[in-house]
Image (cartoon, rainbow, N blue to C red):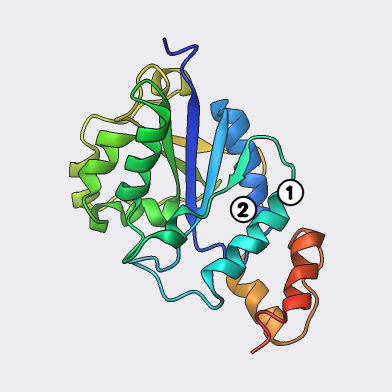
């Protein structure tokens, strides 16, 4: 069953704005995990982060412009239609219902977000719905807090094949071939200072930012 079951990823974030680091990571993790689809989902109000600088609808439009026709990537605006905080458990539950119990459902996290995973809303429910894949940064080392170690327990596996043998419930750390240290914070600052962001963003995204006069205040 593991060879034929659909493989679906969820990549949430503020995407404030989406940049080439986000998009290249999405392509590479899709290849590494052999995902059929990867939903990139802007969060309107992330519970553990500051309020994004522009509206969720503008960030979704920029994400759509950045993805364009990239195979397998989906700009998913489902969290914009939800009232209240953007809890990942709710989104994973929707995706699980859409794709069925046999689908290999994966939530992607960066290392910083992973270290705070035990502080999330119903973190144990994440593993009841999906696998968790941590996108590692080369050379980055950090001790896991005790609550995170307890949450992980015996869930960790060391290969994609072991992860995909089951529909949910496991943890894998995956290093990607390309490391692009692009910061959305830096991009916002450069835009506010009217400095160039060329080659940090897709050209289509840069054009929309300037056309909509975003991030200039």
Q: Position of residue 21 (x, y in %)?
A: 65, 54
User: Is 149 in front, or is 198?
Assistant: 198
Question: Tag 1, which secondary structure?
Answer: loop
State whether residue 92 is above or below residue 117: above
Q: Position of residue 29 (x, y in %)?
A: 58, 37
Please give left or right for residue 166 compared with residue 58 in the image: left
Q: Is residue 178 in sight in this rendering?
A: yes
Please give left or right for residue 162 compared with residue 181 in the image: left
Q: Spatial distance from mark 1 to mark 2, Cα to Cα?
A: 14 Å
Which residue is rendered at x = 37% and y = 20% of the image?
Answer: 102
Which residue is rendered at x = 73% and y = 48% of the image?
Answer: 68
User: Is 125 in front, or is 29?
Assistant: 125
Circle 2 Cα neighbour tier, 10 Å, few/some/many (<14 / 14–19 / ≥20): many
Q: Position of residue 37 (x, y in %)?
A: 56, 33
Query: In which quadrant of the rendered image does the N terminus lie?
Result: top left
Labels 1, 2: front one: 1
Question: What residue is pinned by disc 1?
Answer: 68
Q: Is residue 172 in sight in this rendering?
A: no
Query: In which quadrant of the rendered image does the C terminus lie?
Result: bottom right
State whether residue 170 is above or below residue 132: above
State whether residue 165 is above or below residue 121: above
Question: Tag 2, which secondary structure?
Answer: helix
Question: What residue is pinned by disc 2?
Answer: 22
Which residue is rendered at x = 43% and y = 60% of the image?
Answer: 81
Indicate which disc, 1 or 2, sits on the residue closer to the N terminus.
Answer: 2
């Amino acid at each position: 069953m593991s060879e034929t079951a659909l493989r679906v990823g969820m990549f949430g974030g503020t995407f404030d704005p989406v940049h080439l680091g986000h998009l290249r990571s999405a392509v590479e993790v899709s290849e590494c995990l052999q995902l059929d689809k990867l939903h990139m989902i802007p969060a309107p109000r992330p519970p553990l982060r500051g309020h994004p600088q522009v509206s969720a609808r503008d960030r979704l439009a920029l994400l759509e412009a950045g993805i364009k026709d990239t195979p397998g990537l989906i700009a998913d605006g489902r969290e914009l239609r939800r009232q209240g905080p953007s809890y990942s458990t709710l989104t994973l539950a929707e995706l699980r219902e859409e794709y069925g119990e046999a689908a290999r459902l994966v939530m992607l996290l960066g290392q910083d977000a992973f270290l705070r995973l035990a502080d999330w809303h119903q973190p144990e429910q994440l593993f009841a719905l999906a696998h968790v894949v941590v996108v590692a940064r080369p050379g980055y080392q950090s001790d896991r807090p005790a609550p995170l170690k307890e949450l992980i327990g015996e869930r960790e596996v060391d290969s994609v094949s072991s992860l995909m043998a089951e529909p949910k419930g496991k943890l894998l750390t995956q290093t990607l071939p390309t490391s692009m240290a692009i910061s959305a914070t830096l991009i916002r600052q450069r835009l506010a200072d009217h400095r160039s962001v060329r080659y940090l963003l897709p050209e289509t995204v840069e054009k929309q930012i300037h056309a909509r006069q975003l991030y200039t205040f």
